[in-house]
Amino acid sequence: MRGHLGHLPGERGQASVETVALVPLVLAVGLGLMQMLAVGYATVLAGGAAEAGALALAGGRDPDAAAREALPGWSETKAKLTVTGGRVELRLRPPSVLDALAKQLEVTASAEVEAP
């Protein structure tokens, strides 16, 4: 028969075990959401940097320097710029705990202007 507290024999600590079992799942979901935000942020950065490079190209300046100036410090080493005619394409790896994952989630943005 149940006592005042409603515990059955063998139920002591059950809530603690369930909570501990859920911690890895909550962490994995949280890390996944953070990674999605990082990919979105990298997409916005790549678009802005590609546009800055294209505008520099149209103005007769160095598109690579302009694109890199538009990027924050952490992303400068993770960006690759390609200029073909009046098209500027920037590939950027988002920040990630796993480098292999960052390679798979690389984003690409491009901007195009008429060649001067």
Image: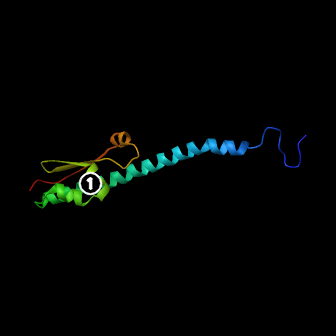
Quick check: 58 above or below 24?
Answer: below
Q: Please identify the quarter of the rendering in which residue 66 is found.
A: bottom left
- Residue 115 position, x and y percent, is 10, 53
- The N terminus lies in which quarter of the figure? top right
Quick check: 99 above or below 73?
Answer: above
Residue furthest out toward the right: 1
Q: Please identify the quarter of the rendering in which residue 71 is found.
A: bottom left
Instruction: Specify the color scheme.
Output: rainbow
Which residue shows up at 88% across the image and 49% down it? 4
Question: Position of 30 compared to 71: left or right?
Answer: right
Which element carries disc 1, helix, strand or loop? helix
- Residue 57 position, x and y percent, is 14, 57
Which residue shows up at 25% across the image and 60% down it? 70
Q: Please identify the quarter of the rendering in which residue 44 is found.
A: bottom left
How many neighbours does mark 1 have within 10 angstroms: few (below 14), some (14-19), or many (20 or more)? some
Q: Which residue is mark 1?
A: 76
- The C terminus lies in which quarter of the figure? bottom left
Which residue shows up at 65% across the image and 45% down it? 19
| Amino acid type indicated by mark 1 | Glu
- Residue 60 position, x and y percent, is 10, 60
- Residue 61 position, x and y percent, is 12, 60
Question: Position of 31 compared to 101: left or right?
Answer: right
Judge by depth and name the residue closer to the eye, 3 or 60: 3
Which residue shows up at 18% across the image and 58% down it? 65
